[in-house]
Amino acid sequence: MTERNRPVRSTYDRALDLLEARARSVAELRRALIRKGEPVAAIDAAIERLLAAGLLDDASFARQFARSKALGAGHSRRRIQQELAKRGVSRDVSDPAIAGVFEDEAVDEEASIERVARKKLRTLGNVDAATQRRRLFAFLARRGYDSDDIQRVMRVVLDGDADA
């Protein structure tokens, strides 16, 4: 290996190590490598090589991330979109990925918010009703749910109003 290629090889190896730890978007990987002090030219070369090899793919990352957050954490479409944007994934990549996951996995957003609300409610058993309502509302809002949907699910899980 020539002395000139050493930084590129080192940056590529570091990028592989970062991707081995967890999947990342192109922008996220770039930021991580910059934070670690890698030279920009070497970062560009490493990312190009990873893209060409199929080891770095924002569309695949967005689908994987959306599936994890929708099914595991019970996040709304809006929250998943926000999280992907923070990770540098463009809307033209993230929107189809999110829509595809919600369709492929048959995610029922109404059932999802109710499941998440009931799970959270189990942890709020030792507080008064007003605090319970406030904390549950805040929790669901942080998950990205719309206030109308939150109000509806709170009537169902707190008040037992099945017609809500």
Image: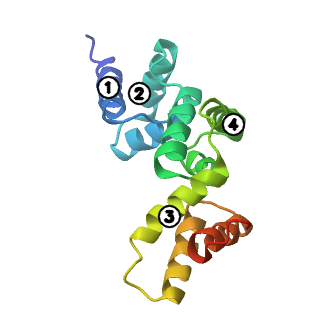
Query: In the image, residue 86 lies at what x, y percent?
Result: 56, 50
Q: Is residue 109 above or below residue 29?
A: below
Of labels 2 and 4, earlier in sequence is 2
Of labels 4 and 1, earlier in sequence is 1
Residue type, mark 2 in image: Ala
Residue 67 or residue 156, whichever sits in front: 156
Circle 1 residue: 7
- Label 1: which secondary element: helix
The residue located at (47%, 51%) in the rendering is 73
| Mark nearer the viewer, 2 or 4 | 4
Circle 4 residue: 99
Q: Is residue 10 left or right of residue 106?
A: left
Q: Is residue 111 visible?
A: yes
Of labels 2 and 3, earlier in sequence is 2
Circle 3 residue: 118
- Label 4: which secondary element: helix
Of labels 4 and 3, earlier in sequence is 4
Circle 2 residue: 42
Q: Is residue 137 above or below residue 128?
A: above
